[in-house]
Amino acid sequence: MTISYVAVGALAQHTNAVTPALPAGAAAGQLAICQVVSAHPNDSVPSIPSGWSLVGSFSGGAGAFGLNTGLRRLTLFARELTGGDGAPSTAVPSGSSGSAIGARVFTLARTAGTGWRWAVTAGIDTTSDTSFSAACSTALTWAAGDFCVLAYGWNTQTASASARAVIATGITYAAATSRLADQISSGNGARLSMATTTVTAGTGTQAPTVTATLSAAATGVGAVLRVREASSDINASPQSVFPPRNLVSVTGLEGDDITSVSVYRQYGTDQTPVRAASGIDTTGADVLLRVDAEQPLGVPVNYGATLTDVNGNSWQVFSGPITSTVDGDVISDAIRGTGAKVFIENWDDKKRTRDATVFNVGGRLVTVGKPRSGAQATVTVSTDTDDDGDALQDVLQNATEGVILIRKQVTLAGVDGHLAILSDDEHRTWSIPYRLWDLETAESEPWPDTLEAAGFTLQDVADNYSTLADLAADFATLLAIALFDFGG
């Protein structure tokens, strides 16, 4: 696993707006970073280029705003390239005396991982001399192999730099390699500088200090952008059971310092939180597993997760599509993991009430009513076999909180949803297994999110393995057991 510096595009500078070119050879999968140094009497943050992410923006310096004096702002944007990417455009407000902006785009490549993860911290040096030292305000986690971008913005445009470095207690960094050193001569001017290094030894959470030796006295801001190959990912797999359910696993969390995870299901443009998987504290955990037993049937669905790291950065990961295929409609209880194959025969009417009272006030009718209720309906379903009829009997008898989930064989709006069972009437045909069921129902909220959907149990393990030795022979880790399909 290695991150490497690839190339840099040309400097673009102006008094208020720039579009720096991507470097030659920029390719899909690379991480492009746009480093911007700007000067403005209002210390304005440059606009975010379309399709890019703001990594961080930091201001530093000393003196009144003017030529080679006052605050300068260092801003970093990032984008994982997809191929055929255009150059980013960014700007500060126009029409201000002395404003200036300069930017360059450089690219990084990786040899492994599922994507890119980064964190940034910065500090300022307000002492105008040639020994620049900026103690950063935020501690980052460090580990051997971390790639580091040392970015600087100074107010003296002629202040070239040497001996750029970063130091942190208990962490060893390689000698930094100079990458960029540009004079921004527009407006009141500035200096853009950048070097790269890596962590060679040490782990821990430390706030670093960024240093450099300058050829001319200056003040300004320095930052460390720590870049890693992502280890976190999401995978979803169908389990061999009825009713269908999908096992969703979010893995590699510790390597990316992920402290909170929210998992959702996506069908079309609709995103629905997966049960018991919103804002889960994963501090110290490497894996989060959840079972989804409420997915729409007969159509492809994807799963995504929002990952929040220890520095508050959020990342998105996505699974491939899964289609849950069945040969009938389904009534189920996701909490207990039970269900029955049925056929919806009749559901013509949905009745809603408003609980209103009409008053005759001097011949004028005045109505006072409550909000319109959810729908109530008689839903008629059939079962074809004794097993299906008994399964439906079990779902209705033991429905968690009296609520069931009904779904069409191919999802259908207005049908799929949660219903509270008010009563049921079973009509048997004694000569054959076929039964009709009239279900008196009311629309209901789903089960409380604190209730997890049932997955495979210890009984499933016992049904497949007679001894712990047999189990250990097939599974190297507890995670492997949790991910295994015992229904297959």
Image (cartoon, grey):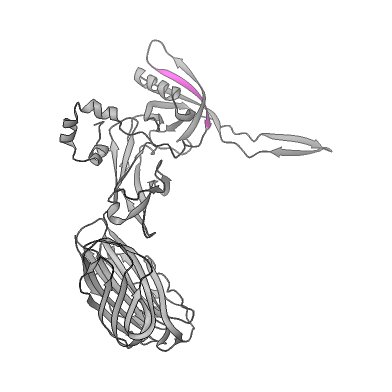
In-image side of 107 versus 391 (left or right): left
Residue at position x 46%, y 76% in the image:
44
439 sits left or right of 153 in the view:
right
Instruction: Establish if 166 lies above or below 307.
Output: below
Relative to the observer, which residue lies in front, 235 or 209? Answer: 209
- The answer to whether residue 21 is seen in the rendering is no
- The vertical placement of 290 against 420, above or below, is below
Give yes or no for residue 439 being in the magenta stretch: yes
Percent position of residue 116, x then y: 28, 60
- Residue 433, percent from left and from top: 37, 15
Residue drawn at x 50%, y 30% is 420
Can see residue 393?
A: yes
Q: Residue furthest right?
A: 362
**Main secondary structure found in the magenta portion:** strand
Q: Position of residue 101 (x, y in %)?
A: 39, 80
Question: Measuring 45% from the left and 81% from the top, which residue is drawn there?
Answer: 40
Q: How many marks?
A: 0
Q: Residue furthest front?
A: 169
Nearer to us in this view, 183 or 209? 209
The percent coordinates of residue 273 (x first, y second) are 42, 45
134 up-or-down from 365: above or below: below
Q: Nearer the viewer, residue 440 or 260?
A: 260
Query: Image quarter for residue 349?
Result: top right
Q: Looking at the rendering, in which quadrant would you find the N terminus? A: bottom left
Q: Is residue 250 above or below residue 183?
A: above
Residue 275 appears in which quarter of the rendering? Answer: top left
102 magenta-colored: no
Instruction: Give the residues drawn in magenta, as a range.
Output: 432-442
Q: Residue furthest top?
A: 431
Q: Quadrant of the C terminus?
A: top left
At 77% across and 35% down in the image, what residue appears?
359
